[in-house]
Image (cartoon, rainbow, N blue to C red):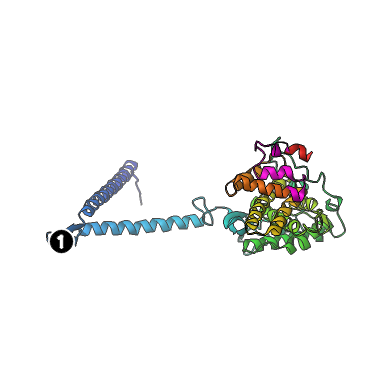
Amino acid sequence: MEMVIDIEDVAYRATSSMRRFFNSTQMKINRFVSSGNEALEDLKTLVTVDDDRRVIIACRRSSLQFFGNFILWGLVVVVAVRVLMELGFLGFRGGYGGGFVWRRDRSLAGKEVVVAKRRFKEREGKKKDLNFRVPINPLTPARDTTNVKITEAEFSPRKHATSEERLPKWWPVSVPSSLASNPTMNSKESQKEADIVMRAIMDNRMSGKDITEDDIIQQFRQICKRSGARVLIETANARDSFYRASVDLVMNACSRSINHSTVVQIDGENAQHFVAGIAFNIGLDSIRAAKIVSAAVAARTRSWFLQAWALEMQGKRMEAVEELSKICLIHQIFPPEESSPEMEMVARGLEKHLRREQREFLFDLLVEICGAGSRRSAAEALGLVQIDSPKYRDYKQATD
C-alpha cells in the first residue's frame, strides 16, 4: 500500500479553504452590517400617523429578526465574559476587587474597604493528589501558630514617613517595659491566644459586628501586656480599622472622666501609653498611629464645639460647659501640634456652621473654664488665630 502526499496540493487546498472561510465571514459581516443599516432606517418610520390621526406601528420582519439576534448574541457574550471572569481566565477572580476581600465598614459610613488579601496556597494535607486552594485569613500568625515563628522584621514599621514627619510631643519616647517582648514560660501559648482573639475580632468585624471595649481591653490588650505578644495584620485597612476603634475607646474614656481627674487611666495605663501600646502590639507605624489619634481628636473637637453651641442656644449652659470641658481634657492629654492640618480642617468646618462672633463666644467660654492651657489649640480649631485683635494676637504668649 502506497500513500502519496502532495505538499503543493495540501497547501492549495488549505489556502482555498482559508480563502473561502474569510470570504464567507466577510459576506456574513457585510450582510449583518447591511441588515443593521436597514433596521435603523426602518426605525425611522416605525411609528406613523395617517390622515385619520391613527397611530400605526409597522416594521419589516427582517428588522425584528435583526434586533432579536442582536439581543440574543449580546446576552450570550455577556454571560460568557462573566463566566470567564469568575474562572479567572481574564485576569480577574471573585468579581470586582480581584484578589481582595471587601466589606462595608459602618464606622466609615458604609464605605467598602479591603479587609483581607485573597491569596491561595496548597493545603498541607493533600487528599487524593488534589491541590485544594483556600483563602488565607488576614491574620498571618493564625495560619499555623505552632509552626510559624514571627520575626521582628515582619513587625518593622512600614517606612511611609518623610523626613519632615515626626511624632507629636505627647507620644511616649519608648515603649514601657511592661510592653517589651520578654519571653516567658508560656510565650507560645500567649502568642497563640492573642492570635485567636484577634482572628475572632476580625471575623466579627467582617460579619458586621462592632469591636467592643471588652474585645480590646479585657482580652487582646491584657494578653499583650502580660506576655509581650504581637499580632501582625497584613491588610492596612483592617489594621487601621482596629486601631481607630481602640482610639475611639480612649476618647470615650476621656469624655467620661472629665469630673474626676485629668489623668485618664485605661486598665491601669495612661491614655498615651495605651494608644502607643496598641500600635506596638499590631505592628502599626508610630507616625501613622499618631496621625489617626490626631484625626480622632480633631473630629471630637469639631463635634463637641458644635454640640456646645447647640446646647447654648437651648439655654443649657451647664451642658455646654460640660462639652467644652471635654475639649479641654482631650487637648491636655493629646495636645495638637501648632498649626496642625487637623485643627485647620476643624476651623474650616466650623466656619461653615458658626459665625465669627459665635466662635469668639465659645472661645471666651472655654478659656474661662480651662484657663490658658488649651488657648492656642482652641484658637486654631475655631479659626481665631488670624483675627486682628489684641485679644487673639498674643495667644502664643499666653500659653508659654
Question: Toward the viewer: 220 or 100?
Answer: 220
Q: Position of residue 50 (x, y in %)?
A: 14, 59
* Kind of residue indicated by mark 1: Arg
Question: Toward the viewer: 175 or 81?
Answer: 175
Q: Residue at x 34, y 59 (%)?
A: 72
Mark 1 — residue?
53
Residue 293 visible in the snapshot:
no
Q: Is residue 375 located in the magenta-colored stretch of the structure? A: yes
Question: Toward the viewer: 369 or 164?
Answer: 369
**Hey, which residue is sitting farthest left in the picture?**
51
Q: Which element carries disc 1, helix, strand or loop?
A: loop
Task: Assign the C terminus to one quadrant of the image.
Answer: top right
Label 1: how many Cα within 10 Å (few below 14, some 14–19, many 20+) = few
Q: Where is residue 174 in the image (x, y as percent from the top left)?
A: 82, 45
Q: Place residue 144 in its image quadrant.
A: bottom right
- State whether residue 71 is above or below residue 333: below
* Residue 167 left/right relative to 126: right
Q: Where is residue 318 in the image (x, y as percent from the top left)?
A: 71, 59
Q: Is residue 52 located in the magenta-colored stretch of the structure? A: no
Q: Residue at x 41, y 56 (%)?
A: 78
* Residue 226 left/right relative to 54: right
Q: Residue at x 82, y 48 (%)?
A: 175
Q: Place residue 60 in its image quadrant.
A: bottom left
Q: Where is residue 294 in the image (x, y as percent from the top left)?
A: 70, 47
Residue 188 visible in the snapshot:
yes
Question: Which residues make up the magenta segment?
Answer: 367-394
